[in-house]
Amino acid sequence: MVSKEEAPAEEQREHLTPMQERLLGYIAFRTIGRDGTSESKRQLAEHLRSSTKTVDRAITRLSNEGYIEVEENLLPDGRQGPNTYRLSR
């Protein structure tokens, strides 16, 4: 039996939902040649034609499973700004 670490990338991603796959692809596309992409969950939801709640769940799962890194950004006045997302694999 092949362990999760040894399985090809396609097999490891089989368990992701179509939305999670789309979000992962979008982040990969937006980070080509960059260190990450900073977008609000609302902006991501608009680009992916989904709800912010669905995007939030997808981000949480992709982050928990180590597909993406999420860096929180604070605005100069201390409020939460758009997070920065980058691939971690």
Image: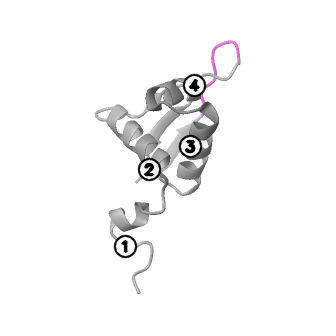
- Residue occupying the point 58% across, 51% down: 61
**Magenta stretch bounds:** 72-78
For label 4, the residue is: 42
Q: In which quarter of the image is the C terminus?
A: bottom left
Left or right: where does residue 26 sit relative to residue 83?
left
Q: Nearer the viewer, residue 69 or 44?
A: 44
Q: Residue 88 carries which label?
A: 2
Q: Residue 83 at x, y = what percent?
A: 56, 30
Tell whether position 1 is magenta. Answer: no
In space, the residues marked 3 and 2 are separated at their CA atoms by 13 Å
In space, the residues marked 3 and 4 are separated at their CA atoms by 12 Å
Under circle 2, the secondary element is loop
Please tell me whether the stretch drawn in magenta is mainly helix, strand or loop. loop
Q: Residue 60 at x, y = what percent?
A: 61, 47
Disc 2 residue type?
Answer: Ser
- In front: mark 4 or mark 2? 4
- Disc 4, disc 1: CB below 8 Å? no
- In front: mark 4 or mark 1? 4
Mark 4: give few (<14), some (14-19) or many (20+) Cα within 10 Å. some
Tell whether position 76 is magenta. Answer: yes
In space, the residues marked 1 and 3 are separated at their CA atoms by 23 Å
- Residue occupying the point 37% across, 75% down: 6
Disc 4 residue type?
Answer: Arg
Q: Nearer the viewer, residue 52 or 6?
A: 52
Disc 1 residue type?
Answer: Ala
- Disc 4, disc 2: CB below 8 Å? no
